Image (cartoon, helix red, strand yellow):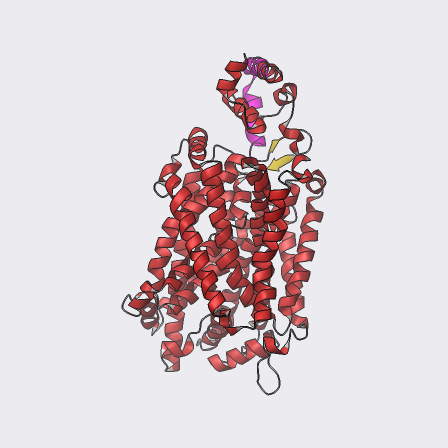
Amino acid sequence: MPLLKSWNLIKRKISSSKGSRSDQSSKKGEEKKGETCGNDDGTKSRHWKTDAQFLLAAIGSAVGLGNILRFPNLCYKYNGFGFLLPYLFAVIFIGVPVLGMECMFGQITQRSAVKAFSKIKPFLWGLGAYVTWAAFMVVSYYNVIMAWSLQYLYYSFQSPLPWGDTTESARNFFYDKVLRMQDEDGDLWTLSDGMGTVNGPLVFALFAQWLLVFFCIYNLTKTVQFVVLVTVPLPFILIAVMAIYGLTREGSTDGVMAYIDPTNNPSALFSLQAWVDAAGQIFFGLSLSVGVMICYSSHQPAESKVVRNSWIIALGNSVTSIIAGFAVFGLLGHFAHSSGVELSEVATSGYILSFETFPATFANFAGKGASQSFSVLFFLTLILLGVDSAMSLVEAVCEAFTDNSNLCRKHVPLVVLFFCTIGFLFSIIMATKSGYYVLDILDHFSSNYLMLMGGGLSAIAVGWFYPAEKLVREVKAYTGEDAFWLPFLWTYLCKYLTPAILILLFGYNFVIDCMRPYNEYPQWALVCFGWIPCLVVPTLAFAVPSLIWPNPNFLSSTESESNRTGQELANMKLPGADVEDLVDTVRSNTSVVTMESMHQEV
């Protein structure tokens, strides 16, 4: 009966408002839409002002260091085509389905990861916390790489460039001046020597990076939607400039052929590791399984064209990666030609490619100020790309708190400041003499375990428990789009194929790493910086507690909005809402209300 009263109040509210609604009030409603939606008690969810701002932010999160650093490195590792084909399959069968799932799920639930998953089943708050933890792990080492870039940007204004014009001199500069892990005899510090002392200049650059991220996101989406207007378009322009310059230099053809020639290493196509790395690149590149896309999409109006937006984000990321690959290999081909050596002698794998080979390449550019200009251009591009991704990861973590706590919601800047401080302190361990190895281990275990498992479990949770068919119907009702063809047979991909692929890749990685220590690192280092933070901690901290504590207080503390009386629902400010909108509000807040149940109650 209380439900019937609520329904009658809603009908009376709609009837009285339809006759008195004027053009002016409709205009005001349109102005408020995109700024806030929700309650009058202060629990408001900021919306993107325009769909373009959402796309800029989402593409900025997807297009990051992975497009410039990881993607070209993996292409070189598997001789171009040996990685491009697995990458294409990964985009179709993993990237687009999971990206579409996260965008649709966030937009329909209007909540960040923890609250959104708990709406499926209360105990699934643990899965939301799991992917949020993944965001923290990634951003902790992500900002260390950005700190390297800040240091290189500073050195780029010197003439001549301090790292010399050979890969050997550039390598020594990176290890000695930037990482401070090389002794007077030229020997590198190793994990067997312990963690070593803290690198003061790197800590200062790391502090500057975290401070930059804080000022870009101190008010979460309200700040981000303006920052991305600058930080997203500019890197694309810079990448285009580097691609045009690199491809027009003498010798660039050799580099491009090493990038795309299918005859270079055809056996790579039959290597399961290439397919594993392609899946990892998709998750890292599209910011999947870290709560970012769920968080960003939760600030979209429910009627936004989510299927279209998912395609734009996925294609924007992949196209940028491919164009960046042409720019990278064109420059490498030119450098090899001008140095009179083979391409294999100047190209390296790993992050060293960007902090060794490229600096040496820029130092060889002819013309007054050309070396400094392109060096500044390159590292400024890295910083801008990295800031967008770092902002999204920080927001995914912070909204896990603001979405579930009234206190945090009222003090958003303090929440962001607190998290940035914790992230900075945690990142200092990667500013020691062994910090590079710690970063490498975290990167490997995050992309090959934390993200893959999060993606598989998320697909299972949404595909089977939401379920996928219901999500498709809701998207169709709100947007008029058919998500079934995202990219095709989406419900079957989400429920069967995509989780199966991710679980298979997870198992393969687990077997390989158990048989052979990753990069021959000491077992204690792999346990402390890999297995524990990426598997043990999320399992013990989130998975186990969610099973024995399925409905914790922090979830129920904000449930007052879901238990409002009919009069409160009638008083909600829903500009332009009709009967169906308000019925859906009741249905989503009670989880059991349907039109059929209302008729039965009557």
Location of residue 121 in the rendering, given as x and y in whole percent from the top left corner: 55, 37
User: What residue appears at the point 41 percent right and 65 percent down from the top-left corner?
Assistant: 74
Determine whether, in the image, residue 253 is placed left or right of residue 69: left
Location of residue 482 in the rendering, given as x and y in whole percent from the top left corner: 38, 34
User: What residue appears at the point 65 percent right and 53 percent down from the top-left corner?
Assistant: 215
The magenta region covers 10-34
Give the residue at the far left of this rendering. Answer: 263
Location of residue 249 in the rendering, given as x and y in whole percent from the top left corner: 36, 71
Whether 417 is drawn above or below 382: the answer is: above
User: What residue appears at the point 58 percent right and 38 percent down from the top-left corner?
Assistant: 118
Do we see residue 601 in this rendering? yes
Q: In which quadrant of the rendered image does the N terminus lie?
A: top right
Do we see residue 576 in this rendering? no
Residues 496 and 411: in front is: 496
Whether 282 is drawn above or below 14: the answer is: below
Location of residue 465 in the rendering, given as x and y in whole percent from the top left corner: 49, 37
Whether 568 is drawn above or below 285: the answer is: above
Total marks shown come to 0
Whether 522 is drawn above or below 5: the answer is: below
Residues 333 and 521: in front is: 521
Quadrant of the rendered image containing residue 88: bottom left
Residues 414 and 185: in front is: 185
Q: Indicate whether residue 132 is drawn in magenta.
A: no
Give the residue at the far bottom of this rendering. Answer: 185
Main secondary structure of the magenta stretch: helix
Q: In which quadrant of the rendered image does the C terminus lie?
A: top right
